[in-house]
Amino acid sequence: MSRPPLHALQGFVAAVRHGNLTRAAESLNLTVSALSHQMRALEDRLGYAVLARGARGVSATADGQRLLERIAPHLDAIAEALHPYPARRDHVLTMSLLPSMASAWLLPRLGGFLGAHPSIEINLQSQTAVVDFERSPEVDAALRVGRGQWPGTVTEHLFDDALAPMASPELVARMGGIDARPLAQWPLLGDSDGQWNRWFALAGEPPPARYVAMLDDTEAHHRAAAAGVGVALGRMTRARLLLEAGQLVLLSPRRLRTANGHWLVYPERSRQHQGFAKFRDWLLAEAAGYARSVDSGPA
């Protein structure tokens, strides 16, 4: 006797577990007629009935129950083994990135890509945690901030970021104007990375005696500055929308380049993703244009 086809055994297990051919067929993306045909063909091959059909649905016969107990664990194991490796869809692309990077940099540009590639669907996962591509096989790539050192991934540099002092227009007015006094005399929002020390060393000016507040989060710096609490040494890329909206203004043309840059990061498997290949080419071109447009100032 030839081996029963795997799809017929899967259909049998689904029928018994659902107790209903209609629901079982729906779970397998089949018509009821197709599933019924599979069950009849399976019983013909085995030489005995595996399903008892009744007015309320279906159930396993005694022979069918013994078959179920033998094959169901193996089918479940196969499904579990294949779970981390879902079928790839080249028209669907899933990206992981910081919420601030999404809103300030990628989203304002994304319409250009989607207009050129209307058949590609982009799923953006805004998250602060670094995605694990092994544990999240549905994610094709990520935009990360760092030094490009993520083992087991392909990394491509997009652009570096730059820092500049920025404050709300209300604070500038209270201080009498941008050039009214040295920056060290303004209320400054301190950071835990010592970036202000680098800034004043580069400018050849003494650092402030104190900071009005210490903040360890970039977005908190931007929000506090926009609220008029003090001057932030803000990241140009992430503060772009606030600057363009006039909620923040730059207090100096000087730019301080950061040690951490922006990177495209992806697992080796994504090289075979046709949609990602198109997105990658577009992203690298956009990043190169952005890098050229940014006046990084003294490094």
Image (cartoon, grey):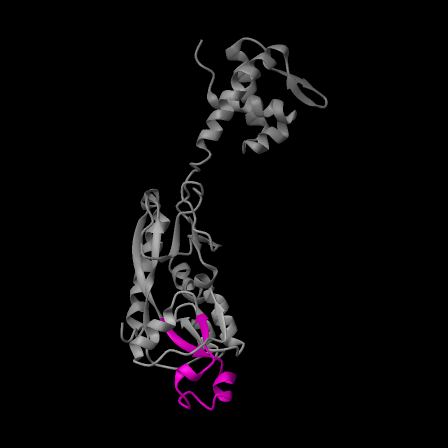
The C terminus appears in which quarter of the rendering? Answer: bottom left
Q: Dividing the picture into quarters, in which one does residue 270 lie?
A: top left
Q: Is residue 29 left or right of residue 91?
A: right
Give me the residue at 33% from left, 55% from top: 280
Q: Dividing the picture into quarters, in which one does residue 134 lie?
A: top left
Q: Nearer the viewer, residue 84 or 128?
A: 128
Give me the residue at 54% from left, 8% from top: 47
Asked if residue 172 is among those painted magenta in the image, a careful observer would answer: yes
Q: Is residue 14 above or below residue 104?
A: above
Q: Is residue 255 left or right of residue 2?
A: left
Give me the residue at 55% from left, 14% from top: 67
Asked if residue 64 is among those painted magenta in the image, a careful observer would answer: no
Where residue 175 appears, as percent x and y from the top left, is 48, 88
Where residue 184 appears, as percent x and y from the top left, is 40, 81
Q: Is residue 136 above or below residue 33?
A: below
Q: Nearer the viewer, residue 10 or 232?
A: 232
Stretch in magenta: 163-190
Give me the residue at 46% from left, 19% from top: 5
Please state the total of marks drawn on the protein image: 0
Q: Nearer the viewer, residue 184 or 149?
A: 184
Where residue 127 appears, as percent x and y from the top left, is 48, 54
Where residue 96 appears, as percent x and y from the top left, is 44, 53
The N terminus appears in which quarter of the rendering? Answer: top left
Residue at the front extreme?
209
